[in-house]
Image: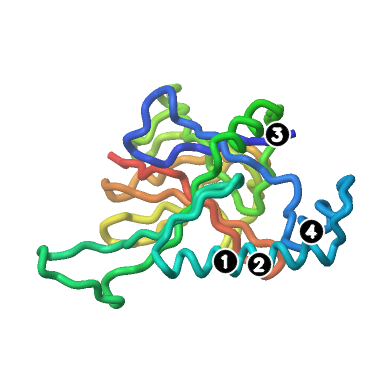
Amino acid sequence: MINYYLHQNKLGTAKEDSLFIARVKPNLHVNHDDMIGLMANKNTTVSRQDIVVVMDLLKEVLEEQLVLGNTVSTNIGRFYVSLGGGFASTSDEYDSTKHSLRIKAKPNTQLVSTVQGKSSVTRVRYNPVTPVIDTIYDMTSQSFSSDLVAGALIELRGNLFKGEDSDKAGVFFINSDTDVVTKISSVYRTLPSSILLSIPEDLEAGNYTVEVRTMSGSVLRTGSYYDEVTVM
């Protein structure tokens, strides 16, 4: 079973049908030793030690071939090298301080087809450890918006909010141009999934990052709204 959850698309160019994107939540992390054990448990006459030797040989030969600049294709995937970084002219040479050697891999098409054909997918609830601001609802205009008016009543909707009130915890507006931080004092209601507050009437017009900060013991956790808001 492949589990996924939806995450807000933070690209400003996101289309209406792509405001949220799916992220896969792994069930387990299977490491190298786990793979050897799983392979040894198959109905095969190959021993665990034989598998260890073959896996080590595969890695060794793969490294040798990539160092030679060769492309290696297996029933798992295709491995090859590429260069990153730009060149000023055709006479410009490779410089390790400006360019990087990269190893890339593409899965075998049959492997992809098998996984796609045998997999089932289900949506799960993502359990973050930091506050999450999903949307901002303007109670005055009764609409979701990033364009807000000073003095307006708004509701932050998301997850893992706490009703804390201290110098470090609460709701904060950070001016994108001046970096001035304004802590919101007019918070009327805090629930785990929503915070009702009003924007200060004297808040300077401009673009702001909205943050919710909570304390977990002595650890400060911060969640930011994916887009800047404009206060008018």
Residue indicated by mark 2: 57
Q: Amino acid at mark 3?
A: Val
x and y percent of residue 100 in the render? 34, 68
Camera-nearest residue between 228 and 174: 228
| Residue at image coords 65%, 31% | 114
| Residue at image coords 29%, 69% | 99
What mark, if any, has residue 61 been given in the picture? Answer: 1
Q: Quadrant of the C terminus?
A: top left
Quadrant in the rendering for residue 152: top left
Distance between the alpha carbons at the discs numbered 2 and 1:
6 Å
Q: Is residue 228 visible?
A: yes
Q: Amino acid at mark 4?
A: Ile
Distance between the alpha carbons at the discs numbered 1 and 4:
18 Å
Of the image marks 2 and 3, the number of the one nearer the N terminus: 2
Residue density around tag 1, few if under 14, some if 14–19, many if 20 or more, within 10 Å: few
- Most extreme residue toward the front is 45
Q: Secondary structure at mark 3?
A: loop
Which is closer to the viewer, label 4 or label 3? 4
In the rendered structure, the answer to whether residue 204 lies left or right of residue 121 reads: left
Contact between marks 2 and 1 (CB within 8 A): the answer is yes
Distance between the alpha carbons at the discs numbered 1 and 3:
41 Å
| Residue at image coords 50%, 49% | 78
Which is closer to the viewer, label 2 or label 4? 2
Residue indicated by mark 4: 36
x and y percent of residue 134 in the render? 53, 37
x and y percent of residue 71 in the render? 44, 55
Which is closer to the viewer, label 1 or label 4? 1
Camera-nearest residue between 152 and 18: 18
Residue density around tag 2, few if under 14, some if 14–19, many if 20 or more, within 10 Å: few
Of the image marks 1 and 3, the number of the one nearer the N terminus: 1
Of the image marks 2 and 4, the number of the one nearer the N terminus: 4
